[in-house]
Structure formats: C-alpha cells, structure tokens
Amino acid sequence: MYSVKLHTVEIERFITLSEAMQFAKTVDAFVTIQSQDFEIVGRFGVDSVKDGVCPDGVAYDWNKASRIGRVKKVRT
C-alpha cells in the first residue's frame, strides 16, 4: 500500500507505486509517497526545462562546468 501525503495529511492511498506517482503528478505540489519500506518526496511531473526555465518558473542555471570537484585547468 502506498500513501500520498500533502505536508503531513494523507490525501490518497494506492495499491501500486505507479498509481501513486501518477496521482502525485496531478497534485502539482511537494508530496510524500510512503510505503512500509520507504518513502519518496518531491514535486512529481517536473521533468523538463524550456528556454532556461523550469515548469514552476524558476530559472535553471546549473551547468556541468560549475560542479564541485571539477578539474581545474592549469595555464602555462
């Protein structure tokens, strides 16, 4: 059994994880999907960036070159 919670309030229960995730996409908010063994948190369905902006309007500015632990080029 998978429980979908908004904040701390259970809003729906599902038999499969697939059904719970599909429902979580329709909520359009940060939710928790909880089972007996684990829990998943997040805003489901936010999986695309168009014109440098996430679906919720936040600018997407991450790039691989600025990641922590990158190899620094030595200029000679």
Image (cartoon, helix red, strand yellow):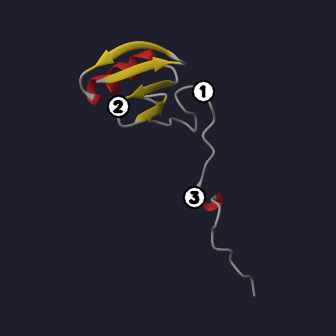
Residue 54: quadrant of the picture:
top right
Residue in the picture at 37% in, 21% down: 3
Q: Which mark is residue 36?
A: 2
**Residue type pointed to by label 3:** Lys
Residue in the picture at 60% in, 27% down: 57
Q: Which quadrant would the N terminus be assigned to in this image?
A: top left
**Other-residue count near label 2 (Cα within 10 Å), few / some / many at <14 / 14–19 / ≥20:** few
Front of the two marks 3 and 2: 2
**Residue position marked by numbered label 3 in the rendering:** 64
Residue in the picture at 63% in, 45% down: 61
Report x, y in % for residue 42.
Answer: 49, 31
Report x, y in % for residue 41.
Answer: 48, 32
Q: Which quadrant would the C terminus be assigned to in this image?
A: bottom right
Most foreground residue, 59 or 34: 34
**Residue type pointed to by label 1:** Gly
Q: Which mark is residue 10?
A: none
Q: Residue furthest left?
A: 15
Report x, y in % for residue 10.
Answer: 44, 14
**Residue position marked by numbered label 1 in the rendering:** 57
**Residue type pointed to by label 2:** Gln
**Other-residue count near label 1 (Cα within 10 Å), few / some / many at <14 / 14–19 / ≥20:** few
Residue in the picture at 32% in, 16% down: 13
Q: Which label's residue is closer to the chain start, 2 or 1?
A: 2
Distance of label 3 from label 2 (alpha carbons): 37 Å
Q: Secondary structure at mark 1?
A: loop
